[in-house]
Amino acid sequence: MKVVKFGGSSLASGAQLEKVFHIVTSDPARKAVVVSAPGKRYAEDTKVTDLLIACAEQYLAAGSAPELAEAVVERYALIANELQLEQSIIEKIRDDLFTLLEGDKSNPKQYLDAVKASGEDNNAKLIAAYFRHKGVKAEYVNPKDAGLFVTNEPGNAQVLPESYQNLYRLRERDGLIIFPGFFGFSKDGDVITFSRSGSDITGSILANGLQADLYENFTDVDAVYSVNPSFVENPKEISELTYREMRELSYAGFSVFHDEALIPAFRAGIPVQIKNTNNPSAQGTRVVSKRDNTNEPVVGIASDTGFCSIYISKYLMNREIGFGRRALQILEEHGLTYEHVPSGIDDMTIILREGQMDAATERSVIKRIKEDLQADEVIVEHHLALIMVVGEAMRHNVGTTARAAKALSEAKVNIEMINQGSSEVSMMFGVKEAEERKAVQALYQEFFAGVLVSSCT
Ligand code: ASP
């Protein structure tokens, strides 16, 4: 039995839904279908989720947003008309949306989540109706009725373990299950969403709960590429990856698959297959616990911008019990999360996403580190990019770091930081954001010998 998830671009129009119908019904093992909200139809289009966020914000600020609300309804209406579905479906979507928008706003974060989640919820209802219209037995399943419970963290929910047993009961149902992605319910009965692109997470949870044999994730590319295709022309497609490799790559900028979506499938030992709705016969990328072909040390190179580093230096830091803990506690007290902490005998560098730290917080953190920890020097550097060179086989391949460092030095990229060894499957380089592209291209050239995309694109 397979759980299949379709992303927003696969569900953006009637024509796309026809492809989805064909894919689902061409394999009887495809039993549960997880859907996103309608996404972009073309590059400049707006996703329904973004329209809903703008709409909820305007309601909160001004009490109404008629144009935005109608724009949302219009997206579903266009799809329904294209597929010749009954008008009553759209009337119901309109009524439910306006009831929701005009409802309780006493908790704005939770109100926003409920409005955001309606994008997938209404889409699942519409898609179930479309499948039935085509003569296939299909049923919309509400996550609350199915027992998908999550933590009460609006916009950042995590699944509660009991959900898996609850979801297992869905196996008894006849016909196709059409399940909205992106949200669950708190124990108090409120709608709570996962982080953005979280329908991938729902699919993985459902695959685990239903104990599926495979989790198929349909998107709009043929495979996961070994590097960002806007940096390198025709990058190599990856046919097989381990969960650990995929997690490292998606964390550092590979947006094909949500980086938190692997764990539920991984825990249940369910492989994930990434495929293209627009080209379903392409092989795609398979994510597994173990792969046989690990001859090449590097499987992919990912990069992401928007990091900063806090460099702390203090003579005899290595002898001071609790120094690291106290430094990190200062971050904790400022509500900051960190990503990496490379350290030496007299210094440590804390790398964090800079978007979470405004100028006042930065000043306060520096002051506290200087005063409380009596640090000799504290320097914050902004606009860093992190580059992750990822591959299980790096562990038993000699000289991978040397090759990477040489490639960067030949490209005249200054390495601000290296973190190698704490993760067995990746090596991290910190460079200035302005050097990101050049650095990634140099590394790709070294490990994959590819054709580069000229830097003016
Ligand atoms: N529609 C939601 C988003 O745009 C979730 C998803 O598509 O996975 O973030």
Image (tube, grey):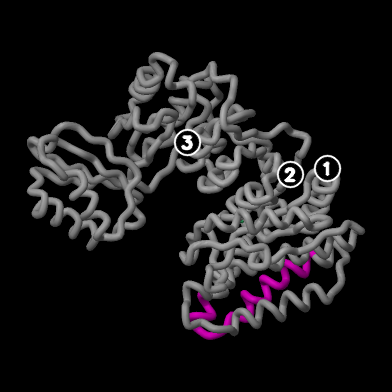
Q: Nearer the viewer, mark 2 or mark 1?
A: 2
Rendering coords of residue 167 (x, y %): 66, 56
Residue 80 versus residue 24 in the image, above or below = below
Check if mark 3's residue and mark 1's residue have beta carbons within 8 Å.
no
Residue type at numbered disc 2: Lys
Q: Earlier in the sequence, mark 2 or mark 1?
A: 2
Amino acid type at circle 1 is Asp
Residue range highlighted in magenta = 57-79
Which residue does the image show at 68% across and 36% down from the upper left? 222
Q: Is residue 64 magenta?
A: yes
- Image x and y of residue 54, in percent: 54, 71
Q: Quadrant of the N terminus?
A: top right
Q: Amino acid at mark 3?
A: Ala
The dot on residue 336 is none
**Tags 2 and 1 touching, CB below 8 Å:** yes
Q: CA distance from mark 3 to mark 1?
A: 34 Å
User: What residue is shown with label 3?
Assistant: 302
Tell whether position 216 is magenta: no
In the rendered view, does 108 fall on the left or right side of 315? right
Which image quarter: residue 256?
top right
Of labels 3 and 1, earlier in sequence is 1
Q: Is residue 41 visible?
A: no
Name the chief secondary structure element in magenta. Answer: helix
Q: Is residue 304 left or right of residue 134?
A: left
Count of picture labels: 3
Q: Would residue 181 be found to the left or right of residue 406 on screen? A: right
- Disc 1: which residue: 27
Label 2 CB sits under 8 Å from any ligand 1 atom: no
Q: Which mark is residue 2?
A: 2
Q: Position of residue 423 (x, y in %)?
A: 39, 32
Nearer to me, 220 or 102: 102
Distance (Cα) linking label 2 and label 3: 29 Å
